[in-house]
Structures are given as C-alpha cells and as structure tokens.
Amino acid sequence: MRLLAFLSTVAVCAAAVNRTATNGWGSTPSQRHYINATQALAAINAAVDYSNSIGVPNDIAILDPSSQLVAFLRMDNAYLGSVDISMKKAKTVTYFNGLFPSYGLLNRSQTMGDLFGIEETNSGLVVFGGGQPIYDYDGYFIGAIGVSGGTVAQDIATSVHGAESIGTTITM
C-alpha cells in the first residue's frame, strides 16, 4: 500500500511539473523530448574521459525516457558483470521519469523502509549510485546514464560528469 502511495505521489509531482511527460499520446515527433545518438555518444565520451582520468574502466549505458538503449560502451578491462548493472541503473532512473538518481531509493528500500523490496520489481532495479537522469537545458527529461565499474562514489561522479556534458542532472 505504501508503494502505491509513493507511486501516486511521484505521478502527481511529474504531472505538476510536466517536464517528464514528454512522449504521451497525441504528441508529434517534434513535440517529444528524448536523447539522440549524437548526444548519447557525447555523454559516453565525457564519461570515458572522466573514467580514464581516475583510472577506472567502466561500462556506460545511455537510455531514452522510455528505457530503450540508445548507446552503450564497455571500456577495455571493465567488469563483465557491470554491463547489466549499468543498464539497470539507467533503467531505474527512467522507470521513475527521471525524478531522482538511482540512489534516490536507497534508504527507503532498506529493511523497515516504506519501499522495502522495491529493487526486486521490474526485473531488478538498482538502488545505489551510478544512474543519473539527463535533462536538456529547457528542463525536459531526455534520458538517463548508468555507469558501473568503480566504487559507488566513482560511479556517481562519472555519471554526473557524463550527464552534465550534454545537459543538466540532479544530485541528492
């Protein structure tokens, strides 16, 4: 029941701002806001540059607002297990319309939290850092970046760097 109340609150917040409801029925392609391939590659390149500067090989995924993969890169020597994690970090962000980073659910998903077990839904959500929403400069949610391969702090810093290379993001 608490999950339903939470999701209702998220929906009300999204509708009030109307920056996440970008691809609904009745819209035309020119009215839709989503990350394109050029932007996705620019974000990946920025994340790779940052990853190289800190010496961490990462897996980097870019998803559009409907959770579809736009671009992906597995850096040399990046962990194979991090491929799925990076995509799920970005998916976690898109499933909640970019209202918060992947770690926005961390405290609430712990034992005794009001969303305990949420990470087991939707074929697996990731509730720790490394997934960031990407907004264009007009404030529209256009996609998400997921980074995995380093520590949580390194993944967050890398994903923020990638997102901010083409737009803006939020941190908590």
Image: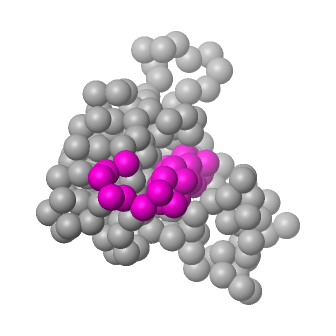
Q: Nearer the viewer, residue 18 or 163?
A: 163
Q: How many marks?
A: 0
In this rendering, the answer to whether 124 lies above or below 110 is above
Q: Nearer the viewer, residue 111 or 74?
A: 74
Q: Is residue 163 left or right of residue 16?
A: left
Looking at this view, name the residue that lies furthest to the bottom.
Answer: 112
In this rendering, the answer to whether 19 lies above or below 105 is above
Percent x, y of residue 150 = 35, 70
x 54%, y 34%: residue: 68
Please provide the residue range marked out in magenta.
74-98
Answer whether residue 133 is magenta in the image.
no
The image quadrant that residue 115 belongs to is bottom right
Looking at this view, name the residue that lies furthest to the front.
Answer: 77
Scheme of colours in the image: one colour
In this rendering, the answer to whether 155 lies above or below 72 is below
x 43%, y 53%: residue: 146
The image quadrant that residue 155 belongs to is bottom left
Quadrant the N terminus occupies: bottom right
x 36%, y 44%: residue: 73
Answer whether residue 91 is magenta in the image.
yes
Q: Is residue 69 left or right of residue 78?
A: right
Quadrant the C terminus occupies: bottom left
Percent x, y of residue 7 = 71, 57
Percent x, y of residue 19 = 47, 39
Can you see residue 125?
A: yes
Looking at this view, name the residue that lies furthest to the right.
Answer: 1
Can you see residue 21?
A: no
x 27%, y 66%: residue: 56
Percent x, y of residue 82 = 47, 60
